Amino acid sequence: MPQSVPRAGGALLPPAVVDGLRAAVRRVPEAAEALPFDTVAVPLRHGLEAADILRLRGVCGAVLSDSGGTRLLFLVPPGTSERWHLAGSSCTPGAAAAPGAGWLVGTLGAGAALRATDPWVLRAVLCEAAGTLMAGGFGPY
């Protein structure tokens, strides 16, 4: 039976998922980089499900993993934090790519700028992802 790696909130992720995430993430340079976005933070498993849905629909903006590997951070337009209210997530003004963090979804090409995810599309997808996780027996996350 495969062993699982514990994560924040008691959720378990199979080692292959954790290894795949680590391999997919591009590390941020040593100095923190301030970004002109707000940040929506969600637990890792919830964020991975949401990022997959967003990518399949072609609407996924930039996504960071935090330095601890327990959360995903979706970049949203500035000002979103003033109106964000969704249980299981938080939205903070400003964004910074801190040392130890990494990009799960970064720029779309060489020299391209980071793209924010539409906050209301993200909200709907986070709700959809939560339902999928609950139906699969992975909640609460």
Image (tube, rainbow, N blue to C red):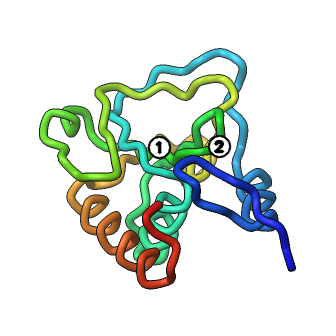
Between 62 and 12, which is closer to the camera in this rendering? 12
Give the crowd class for mark 1: few <14, some 14-19, many >=20 residues within 10 Å. Answer: many
Q: Amino acid at mark 1?
A: Leu
The circle drawn on residue 18 is: none
Q: Residue furthest top?
A: 31
For discs 2 and 1, the disc positioned in front in the rendered view = 2
Residue for point 42% across, 68% down = 54
Between 104 and 3, which is closer to the camera in this rendering? 3
Query: Above or below — where is 100 with respect to 58?
Result: above
Given contact means CB atoms under 8 Å apart, are the residues at marks 2 and 1 in contact?
A: no
Q: Amino acid at mark 2?
A: Gly
Query: Where residue 7 sits: x, y (%)?
Result: 64, 51
Residue for point 46% across, 75% down = 133
Q: Secondary structure at mark 1?
A: strand
Query: Above or below — where is 135 with respect to 110?
Result: below
Residue for point 65% across, 62% down = 12
Q: Residue furthest right?
A: 1
Residue underneath mark 1: 73
Q: Quadrant of the N terminus?
A: bottom right
Query: Where residue 90 sits: x, y (%)?
Result: 32, 41
Q: Residue furthest left?
A: 83
Residue for point 55% across, 61% down = 45
Between 138 and 18, which is closer to the camera in this rendering? 138
Residue 31, quarter of the rendered image: top right
Residue 134, quarter of the rendered image: bottom left
The circle drawn on residue 69 is: 2
Q: Secondary structure at mark 2?
A: loop
Query: Where residue 22 sits: x, y (%)?
Result: 76, 51
Give the crowd class for mark 2: few <14, some 14-19, many >=20 residues within 10 Å. Answer: some
Q: Please indicate whether residue 36 sits to the left or right of residue 67 in the image.
A: left
